[in-house]
Amino acid sequence: MFHGIFTFDDERELSLWGAKLSAFQYNVRRLAATVAALAVGGTGLVLAAPAAHAAEASDVVAKLPASSFSDMVVDSQNQRVFISDKSSAALYGGMVVAYDFEGHRVGSFTTETRASGLALSEDAATLYVGQREGVFAYDTLTLKETGRTAAYQDACGRELAVTGTKRWHTTTPASNDSYCDQNRTDLDSVVGGVHTRTNWNAAGKLLLATGDGAADRLFMGQARGPVSPDPFLTSFDTSGDTPVRGDSRRFADAEGKGALDLKDIAVSADGSRLAVADAAYGTRLLNSGDLSDAGPGYQPLPTGATASAVAFSGDGKYVARGASATGSTPDLLIQPADPANGTTAMEFAFEGDLDGNRVVPRGLEWSKDGSRLFAVTTNAYGNAFWLHIVQPPAAQYDSRFTGALTHTPGQAVVGEPVGIRGRLELDGTAPSEPVRVSAVRTTADGTRKLAEAEVAADGTFTVLDVPDAVGSATYTVSFLGDLTHRPAEDVSLTVDVAKAPTAIALTAPAEASMAAGVEITGRLTAQGRALPAGVTLAVERTDRLGTGTLSSVPVAADGTFTVKDLPRARRDVTYAVTYGGDDLHTGSSASATVFVTR
């Protein structure tokens, strides 16, 4: 909890899609619930007759005329995207550029001093731009200045937010940029055109966020810095004349580990959840009321990706999570906003001079209807920027497994391949990527993820496995969804896994003498896993005098062995060789009869 007047100078300071958009050299890969695995089967898919046609995901890229990035705001009413560039100048010069929803540049204007935070009025008629000496207002269509409100001087870039008719901004005075994470930042407001200091402040930079589902609430987060090692999150009720702080939270444990490294905040469409891009943790999903953890949370970002941005779609369906990553590691995931939905995420790995290399902090915004995601990326040097406009599919269709699963061979044995066969049926249009199903095997020893299997043109698939234990094994097959299809209900099959068979083959002479003795050679073979070292075989001799046990014989590494004996009686002598089996193999035996002379 917070204490005093909220001055922190003396305190410690979160199977929808899986497609490849090759037109812009993206590496778009399926994020399944299984580990990376070998695909088995054919290509394509047979589809049920669609009731409608789903739009394919598409993407437009615009190279921004900017040397820096400050903020982005989306005007869904007028279909405009505004992006501010503070410019490379330390204190002066800046620009705001406007694009339409198709990626065309439709206008721009320069600012007197560096352009920082952006916000829209409630009716979307006015664009507010934070600058050094105050908050400036511009007409969203003409881009002409319509007014300005003087404010305390800010040298670090103002955060802007609007709740109803109230405007909020931060003020951080500093002699240069290197002190912005150390100086005190104040929360100020503009009500009725009058600038007011709220007296809420904290050390270092502060981030502000609002959402349509929480119209009278303002969320604030503290950036991590040298004077804020354990940053906070909090919220304010802005329905009255002055902001009233609600619940708050810090994240470090008693040893100081786990502190928040805040990069972005997003409010869900209904206002009930808060998603936080935490560079030290990933994507945190919180209850917006008391800022407690909301379970289940989102799956971790790919290994090597550091959270940089997060945004909920205005229709409440999706969440986009941006990251900074290198190479083919995904920088952007788009998935259902409900983390309990297991649908596959759509992943983008931005690579090269046509795309940028990573999503910038706070570089994600959605249109209000959820039809477009706007993402800003930058290069490795942070001096070139791109605007990506992604259109998700317009509809999703059902999927189902038809018929029961079967397996081949009819008797599964330990250590030998078994194929789990089934059929998947999808409604709607064919996906652009090959469809795959995932599977797990559950035994008394636990659950193991298996290789994904590709679905063939007729909808059939075969999941391959090599059982490693005797007993019952239950195979559960899943389809997590793709670009245009919802997940299917899982199907399961229990298979009885038996011991692997063995066999003994003998080569014996038809006749031998008592004086020279008998020599029989043979080979022990086994299916499944190799036999253990040190195997021996039991040998029995039966003649006219009765049956007796001879010395056991060792089996060589290649399975061969030799039985040598000096018979005790003439006429027919039968030699029986037996392998008793082990935990993974059945026993086996063979016999040979030799006519013995004197």
Image (cartoon, rainbow, N blue to C red):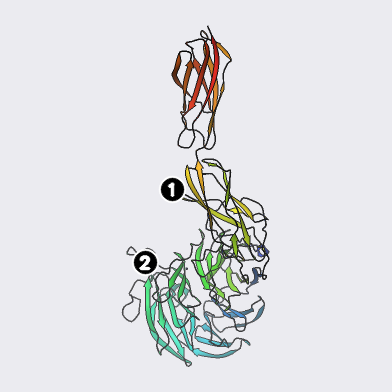
Please tell me which residue is depicted at 64% across the width and 65% down the height of the picture. Answer: 427
**Number of other residues with Cα within 10 Å of mark 1, as a class: few under 14, some 14 to 19, many 20 or more:** few
- Residue 206 spot, x, y in % from top left: 44, 76
Q: Helix or strand or loop: what does disc 1 sit on?
A: loop
Confirm whether residue 158 shows in the render: no
| Distance between the alpha carbons at the discs numbered 1 and 2 | 39 Å
- Residue 144 spot, x, y in % from top left: 61, 88
Q: Which mark is residue 361?
A: none
Q: Helix or strand or loop: what does disc 2 sit on?
A: loop
Query: Looking at the image, do the residues carrying marks 1 and 2 touch, with CB atoms under 8 Å apart?
Result: no
In the image, residue 514 sits, relative to residue 250, either above or below, namely above
**Number of other residues with Cα within 10 Å of mark 2, as a class: few under 14, some 14 to 19, many 20 or more:** some
Please tell me which residue is depicted at 45% across the width and 37% down the height of the picture. Answer: 583
Question: Label 2: which residue?
Answer: 252
Type of the residue with mark 2: Ala
Q: Nearer the viewer, residue 171 or 251?
A: 251
Type of the residue with mark 1: Ala
- Residue 96 spot, x, y in % from top left: 59, 80
Q: Which mark is residue 444?
A: 1
Please tell me which residue is depicted at 55% across the width and 67% down the height of the picture. Answer: 335
Q: Quadrant of the N terminus?
A: bottom left
Q: Nearer the viewer, mark 1 or mark 2?
A: 1
Left/right of residue 348 with respect to residue 231 in the rendered view? right
